[in-house]
Image (spheres, helix red, strand yellow):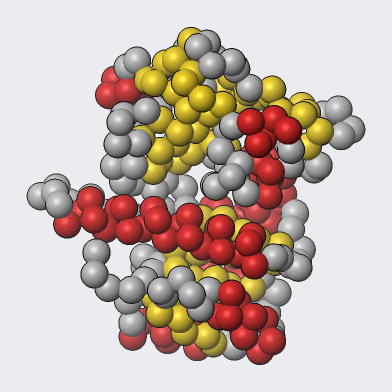
Amino acid sequence: MDRKLKVLIVDDEPIVLKSIKMHLARDNFEIVTVLQAEDALKELKLKNVDIVLTDLMMPEMDGLEFMAAMKKQKSNAQIIMITGYATISTAIEAKKLGAFDYITKPFTKKELRETVLRLAEIIIATLDSQSNTSSEETLGNQGQKIVSDRFRIVGDNTWLVREENENVLIGVERPFLISLGRIKSVFLPKVGDNLRQGSSAIQFISVDLKSLELLSPLSGTVVEVNEVVLSNPNTVLQYPYGEGWLLRIKPSRFEEEIKVIGL
């Protein structure tokens, strides 16, 4: 892919726009900033925008209303929500409207770049895949399912990436964990364990001892687990699409099982 990805930042606070633009300045994006959602919609009509970072709380049209308007306008731009009011209901609504992820204020430069660069990597991989194949593979309703040869979202709780050596990297969607709050422990299978599709594979325990289980999206043998997550469990909530990946498996029935989960 030759062109730069275009990033549109929408926030009613000029200082926030300036800060985000500065944090992303070295990442080879073409960046456009606007103060109002209405202006952002005009920009989306005029230009081919790849990524939209939008604030949740804005006057006249808030972030969720803006996302709904984008959907009505049939924009293919991928969305990252910026909010100081993160709740499970907000996260779910944002995902329904097509958000890739969200970050909460105040955020660090690392948190911002990690989320944006992860999405950029997926978009680039998808565009490269489209240019190298005769099939019509489109991004479509990406907040719920990003279709590419590499990255896929399974339901509302798991993501996976098929690597060049055909191993599969598995992680968790942030909204799936948000109800837990601060995570005390993560229990992962051991290297060499054999997983069966649909079996309980991963468990998350919160500081108040609530728990959630994550089912394995595929069958296969565990070849690596993320030691960072084991030593610092909250990494999975802070950086679910980067440092917070969970495990890597060698799938045993990838082509058959990927169809079972609707991909």
Total numbered badges shown on the rendered structure: 0
Query: Does residue 109 appear in the picture of this structure?
Result: yes
Q: Quadrant of residue 245?
A: top right
Residue drawn 40% across the image and 56% down it? 121
Q: Nearer the viewer, residue 169 or 34?
A: 169
Residue 90, position as x, y percentages in the image: 68, 57
Query: Does residue 180 appear in the picture of this structure?
Result: no
Q: Quadrant of residue 252?
A: top left
- Farthest-out residue, right: 208
Q: Nearer the viewer, residue 183 or 10?
A: 183
- Farthest-out residue, left: 134
Residue 114, position as x, y percentages in the image: 56, 58
Residue drawn 45% across the image and 33% down it? 169
Q: Is residue 170 left or right of residue 244?
A: left
Q: Is residue 36 left or right of residue 83?
A: left
Residue drawn 54% across the image and 87% down it? 34
Q: Up-down: is 160 above or below 133?
A: above
Q: Quadrant of residue 16?
A: bottom right
The N terminus appears in which quarter of the rendering? bottom left
Q: Nearer the viewer, residue 249 or 79?
A: 249
Residue 214, position as x, y percentages in the image: 61, 26
Q: Up-down: is 41 above or below 148?
A: below
Residue 243, position as x, y percentages in the image: 59, 45
Q: Is residue 161 left or right of residue 61?
A: left
Residue drawn 58% across the image and 86% down it? 36
Q: Nearer the viewer, residue 65 or 197?
A: 197
The C terminus appears in which quarter of the rendering? top left
